[in-house]
Amino acid sequence: MAAYSYLTQSIQSTALITAKTIDSFYYPTTQGHTGYAWDGTLYAGGVRVAVGSPPTPIYASWFTEGQSAYRGILPTFPQTGLVLLSKAALTILDGSDSTLALWMQFLLQNNFALADNFNGNLNGWSPSGLAYADGILSVIYTPDAGSLFNVSSPPVYNVDSNMVVNLDFSQDTAYLDVAI
């Protein structure tokens, strides 16, 4: 399989990820973090959670995910990274590797974490911006031109505002925020 060509894509937005001392995701002990940290382990109030005898850490799904076409070899979240957002994918590259190796890639598709039509109606959204803070990567979407809003009978719940999909590595989940 040929490697995905990140640099030939139309990049909509970029973001840099760097470990900051005020970021509890990267400094879970000193910042009293609750949730998964960059090292893939679960913390509660800055203390690593472990179960069993001998105590075994609890790991996030993204930490235990195996290498594939969409997942690089580094299990931990990159301490430095470059995020590229195109109309087809969100790609996180490992900035600690001089080749900017793939860390993880999300494809834009219905019923995926990066949904482009979350409500199944004749409307859609395109990724347009990024933000990162404390283990959460937020993807900002704008409504697609030509989407049909509030035209069905009876009226269907349609959203014609911007939306944000949050890839929350700290809680090991993805969720959607929409203004209506």
Image (cartoon, grey):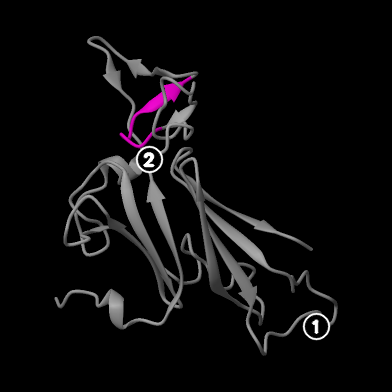
Q: Secondary structure at mark 2?
A: loop
Furthest residue in direction front, as rendered = 21
Q: Secondary structure at mark 1?
A: loop
Quarter of the view holding residue 79: top left
Q: Quadrant of the C terminus?
A: bottom right
Amino acid carrying label 1: it is Ser
User: Is 159 on the left or on the right of 45, as rendered?
Assistant: right
Mark 2 vs mark 1, CA separation in Å? 48 Å
Mark seen at residue 152? 1
Residue 42's place in the image compared with 115, above or below, is: above
Amino acid carrying label 2: it is Ala
Foreground residue among 83 and 142: 83
Q: Which residues are magenta?
A: 37-44
Residue 80's place in the image compared with 32, above or below, is: below
Q: Residue at x 18, y 74 (%)?
A: 3
Residue 97 in the image, given as x and y percentages of width and height: 18, 54
Give neighbour class at mark 1: few <14, some 14-19, many 20+ (Cα, 10 Å).
few
Q: Residue at x 14, y 76 (%)?
A: 1
> In this figure, which residue is indicated by the disc labeled 2?
19
Q: Tell me which numbered mark, 2 or 1, is placed earlier along the sequence.
A: 2
Q: Residue at x 49, y 21 (%)?
A: 32
